[in-house]
Amino acid sequence: MKKWLIFIYIFVLLTATAVALSVGASHLDHLWQVLLHPHSTTFPGDRNILWQIRVPRIATALLVGAALGGAGVMAQGACNNPLAEPAIVGTSAGAAFGVVVGLLANVVAIGSLGAIMCGIFGGLAASMLTLHLARTREDQASVVLIIVGIATSATIAAMVGITTAMISRADARSVSFWTWGSLALTTGKDLWVLAPVVVLGISGAWFIAPRLDLLSFGDSTARHIGIDPVKTRRIALIALSILVAGAVSTVGSIAFLGLAAPHIARLGFGPRHRPLVLHSAVVGAAILLIADTAARTVAAPRELPIGLITALIGAPILITLVRRNIDVWRVQ
């Protein structure tokens, strides 16, 4: 375990935060004065841009990235499959569908607690459906899980697109919002709901993590030492659904991050799930913040889909790290 890597990750995270505060469509001439004196009435234009737009967006990116990083650990641990992630096991699409149904029923708004509850129900239902449909012979379990998960996600994503087209409400967003995600419309109010949800989900993941270590040896071994594999998976999927629902209901679906962050963290810190939850959260937060900063500045004033940026950033890193050490998946 390379403990010194956590300091590099934190340094990258702090540097990315400083850059994200400094760049944008509008240049802030008095950035640090406004940042250090948030209640000052001087430089009102810079203060409004910083505290009403950039800071909430940066905080949202950090929270959502941490949520997706932790969710990826839960998906891989619950499925005992290194290729599992929220998008592949159907959780992301299920959460999006749950929120969209709530919007269609005109009972919730994006980013609200009600939307997150709808997302939790939809994500948990989709994850359980994937696991149920993927039950097969032991020697084919990994392959079947991925195939069934992809098919389930594609089906539900199609339902999201159809349902979105039926919604006339302005806050329903577009199909691309639910496919690639966007932080463009996040506000400070979103944080009051998102932050407790992420803390709750990470806490649940931290609680169940040691049992996932034992589950990685196989269901029969887990039962032999007194661990109930079914109950363990259910708790992990609940934590996964909470984290994904908070992210999806606020910024839409962001693919690949839940796969890349745990692998990057695992290659640096080993396979044990409890430390992996926290390290993946840090890695996920850093990747998403960097991706969002690039999405809003590379083609300014136009904004690129953040899901495309996370794939471009995460894929090369993941390929490089996995090629260097392919055996870190197993708990020793």
Image (cartoon, grey):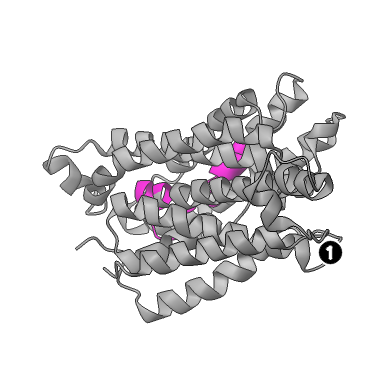
- Residue 134, compared with residue 203, is above or below; it is below
> Which residue is painted at 55% across and 51% down in the image?
65
Q: Nearer the viewer, residue 205 or 11?
A: 11
> Hey, which quadrant is residue 326 in on the image?
bottom left
Residue 249, percent from left and from top: 64, 36
Q: Nearer the viewer, residue 283 or 43?
A: 43
- Residue 267, compared with residue 167, is above or below; it is below
Specify the segment rendered in magenta.
Answer: 74-95
> Hey, which quadrant is residue 202 in on the image?
top left
In the displayed orientation, state which residue is furthest to the left.
Answer: 225
> Which residue is painted at 47% across and 60% down in the image?
283
- Residue 145, compared with residue 319, is above or below; it is above
Check the picture and name the quadrant holding the C terminus: bottom left
State the SS at label 1. loop
Is residue 253 among what the camera can see? no
Residue 298 inside the magenta-drawn segment? no
Q: Hey, what amino acid is under mark 1?
A: Ala
The residue to which callout 1 is attached is 300
